Amino acid sequence: MQDTKERIVSLADQLIKTRGYNAFSYKDISDPLEIKNAAIHYHFPTKTDLGIAVIDVELQQFMASTARLANQPEDKQLKFLFETFSKKHKEGLVCLMGSLSPDYDTLPEPLQEKITDLSGAILKWTSACLEKGREKGLFRFDGEPYDRALLVITNLLASLLLSRVMGNKVFPKITHQLLKDLGAGK
C-alpha cells in the first residue's frame, strides 16, 4: 500500500512539474498507474492533500541533501543547487517552486503555506551558503546575502522556464553567468 502512495506522489510531482498543479486531475494519475480514483482518494482525500504531500517530499529531499553537504565548502554546496536545477532542465521539468508559484493565488491556503515554507527553506539555505562563502572568500558580490539569494533563485527558476521557450542553450548560459558573477565560476 505504501508503494501505491509513493507512486501517486511521484506521478503527481511529475505532472506538476510538466503541466502545473491546476492542469492535472486524479484521472491523469489513475490511468497510467492503472488504479481507480478511489485508491488515490484513499491516500489523498483532496487534491490539496496530494499537493502538500508532493511539497513535503521535495522539502524532505532538499533538507537531506543539504545536510549531507554541510561539511563541504560553500562553493561546492552552491554548485549542488545549480546541478539540481540542471538535472531538472535535462529532464524537461521546471522545479516545483517554479511550477506552483504562477498558480499561487488560485491554490487553497494550506497549499500556499507549504509553497511558502518550501521557498523560505530554499532561500534561507542559499542565503546562509552565500554569506558563509563570502566570509571565506569563495564568493564575491555586493549587497546582502539574502538579496543575492533572491537573485540566484529567481534566475534559476526563470532559466528553466526560458529554456523551454528559447532552447536548451539558454540554461547553461544563465547558470554559467550566475556562477561567474559570484566569483564561483572557476
Image: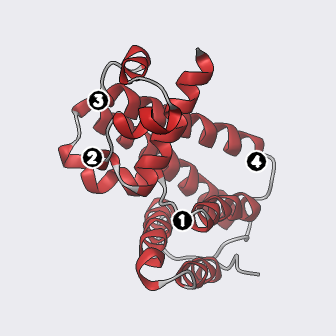
Element assignment for label 2: helix
- The one nearer the camera, 94 or 180, is 94
Q: Dot 1 lies on which element?
A: loop
- The span from disc 3 to disc 4 (Cα, nearest Å) is 30 Å
Mark in the foreground, 3 or 4? 3
> Taking the image as drawn, is residue 137 in sight?
yes
Among the two numbered marks 3 and 1 on one chain, the one whose residue lies closer to the N terminus: 1
In-front residue for pair 179/34: 34
Decide which of tag 4 and tag 1 comes sooner along the chain: 4
Which badge, 4 or 2, is on the more N-terminal residue?
2
Measuring 36% from the left and 42% from the top, which residue is drawn there?
A: 116
- Name the mark on residue 92: 1
Q: What mark, if any, has residue 69 been given in the picture? A: 4
Q: Amino acid at mark 2?
A: Asn
Q: Is residue 153 above or below residue 140?
A: above
| Residue 55 in sight from this viewpoint | no
Query: Which is in the foreground here, disc 3 or disc 1?
Result: 1
Q: Position of residue 101 (x, y in %)?
A: 32, 53
Graded by Cα atoms within 10 Å as few (under 14), some (14 to 19) or many (20 or more), the crowding at tag 2 reads few
Q: Nearer the viewer, mark 4 or mark 1?
A: 1
Q: Amino acid at mark 1?
A: Gly
What is the spatial separation of the Cα atoms under label 4 and label 2, in whole angstroms? 34 Å
For residue 116, side relative to residue 96 (left or right): left
Mark 2 — residue?
Answer: 22
- Sequence-wise, which precedes: disc 2 or disc 3? 2
Q: Quarter of the image holding residue 25?
A: top left
Residue 120 pos. (x, y %)? 43, 45
The span from disc 3 to disc 1 (Cα, nearest Å) is 28 Å
- Provide residue 88's location: percent of width, then percent of height: 58, 60
Name the residue tied to disc 3: 110
